[in-house]
Image (cartoon, rainbow, N blue to C red):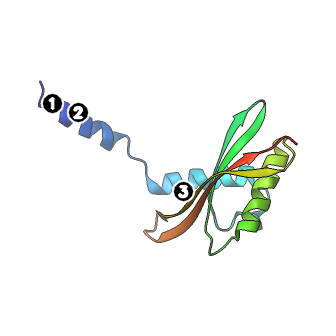
Amino acid sequence: MRFLTPILMGLFVVGCSVDPQVAAERRAKDIESLIPNPADRDGVYLVYPYAGAGSFTAITFFWEPSKISENKARQIVSGICARAGRSGSISIDNDLGTGTRTLPDGKTITVRQVWFGCEFD
């Protein structure tokens, strides 16, 4: 029976793998729902809001520094927070720096990863 455990675990991992194209489409849909202006979406890789007290308290935001400046990223996140009922004031809770991500077509991009806090004021 012990020899089955690694086999079953391997099958579980294979069964849980995510199609990169499906993941990209889901990210694009999430980005579209949070950023209404299409021009502001170019270069955004991932937006993940954290909710609390009825609105977003923090947002994990990944963007391509080659397409979006930090100042522009802050403006985009500020708008997301304001539309969620916060003041629009933001803080950097955790700057994770840069990393790389692979797109469904195999191209690798550099992204900046920051956890922003949405303030009440």
Q: Are marks 2 and 3 in contact (CB under 8 Å)?
A: no
Residue on which the image places disc 2: 8
Query: Callout 2: few (<14), some (14-19), or many (20+) C-alpha neighbours within 10 Å?
Result: few
Amino acid residing under circle 2: Leu
- Tell whether 68 sits left or right of 103: right
Q: Quadrant of the N terminus?
A: top left
Image position, residue 6 (x, y; %): 19, 35
Sequence-first disc among 1 and 3: 1
What amino acid is at disc 1? Answer: Leu
Number of dots carrying numbers:
3
**Residue extending furthest toward the bottom:** 66
The numbered dot on residue 4 is 1
Relative to 99, 76 lies left or right? right
Give the labeled residue for mark 3.
24
- Kindly check if marks 1 and 3 are in contact, taking CB atoms under 8 A apart as contact: no
What SS does tag 2 mark?
A: helix
Q: Position of residue 63 (x, y in %)?
A: 62, 63
Note whether 52 is above or below 46 in the view shown: above
* Circle 3 crowding by C-alpha within 10 Å: few under 14, some 14–19, many from 20: some
Q: Are marks 2 and 1 in contact (CB under 8 Å)?
A: yes
Using the image as rendered, state which of residue 121 and residue 105 is in the foreground: 121
Residue at horizontal 61%, vertical 68%? 64
Tell me how far mark 2 sits from mark 3, CA to CA.
Answer: 28 Å
